[in-house]
Image (tube, rainbow, N blue to C red):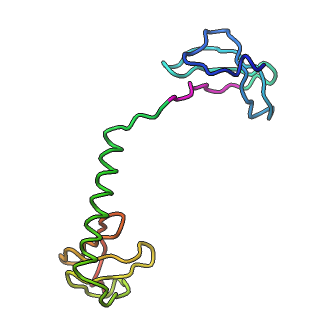
């Protein structure tokens, strides 16, 4: 069985046997490849209980996608902006956040879920607040 556990870099051929963990049997069993469903996945069937599952090739290395890189850059930018606002406004009075309260720009608020943030914009019944991780739109001045 040890020789079957070696790393597979391409999908095994149809009707070939693989040693995998069977969830239904709750132990390691031989599975037979029934069909290839994609370039990196195949439908397999347990030889003992006949349960079917999808086998996916183990990923060697995750690629950093453009979306992940963009999110990471946005998070770093937001953290920098939060620190900048914190330095500008200092450690003045921090007001607890309530939807019924009215707030002004450059006020520090303490939100029960998101923590301390700084108000960057006020418009109508909405405020833009810069928290350490992300900017959020919150409601204010609601009666």
36 vs 127: above or below: above
Q: Which quadrant would the C terminus be assigned to in this image?
A: bottom left
49 vs 119: above or below: above
In depth, the one of 28 and 81 nearer the eye is 81
Q: Can you tell which quarter of the image residue 133 is in?
A: bottom left
In depth, the one of 80 and 126 nearer the eye is 80
Residue pictured at 56% horizontal, 28% vertical: 58
Q: Can you tell which quarter of the image residue 85 is in?
A: bottom left
- In percent of width and height, residue 90 lies at 27, 84
Q: Can you tell which quarter of the image residue 82 is in?
A: bottom left
Residue pictured at 34% horizontal, 88% vertical: 95
Horizontal side, residue 132 vs residue 104: left or right: right
> Which range is magenta?
52-60
Q: Which quadrant would the N terminus be assigned to in this image?
A: top right
Residue pictured at 75% horizontal, 22% vertical: 46
- In percent of width and height, residue 12 lies at 61, 13
Q: Is residue 21 magenta?
A: no
Residue pictured at 70% horizontal, 22% vertical: 5
- In percent of width and height, residue 11 lies at 57, 15
């Amino acid at each position: 069985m040890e020789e079957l556990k070696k790393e597979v870099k391409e999908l095994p051929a149809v009707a070939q046997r693989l040693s995998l963990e069977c969830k239904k049997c709750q132990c390691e069993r031989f599975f037979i490849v029934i069909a290839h469903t994609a370039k990196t996945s195949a439908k397999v069937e347990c030889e003992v209980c006949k349960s079917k599952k999808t086998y996916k090739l183990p990923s060697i290395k995750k690629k950093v996608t453009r979306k992940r890189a963009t999110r990471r850059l946005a998070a770093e930018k937001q953290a920098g902006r939060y620190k900048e606002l914190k330095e500008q406004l200092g450690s003045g009075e921090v007001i607890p956040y309530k939807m019924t309260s009215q707030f002004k720009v450059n006020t520090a608020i303490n939100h029960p879920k998101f923590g301390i943030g700084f108000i960057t914009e006020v418009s109508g019944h909405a405020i833009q607040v810069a928290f350490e991780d992300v900017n959020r739109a919150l409601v204010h001045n609601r009666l």
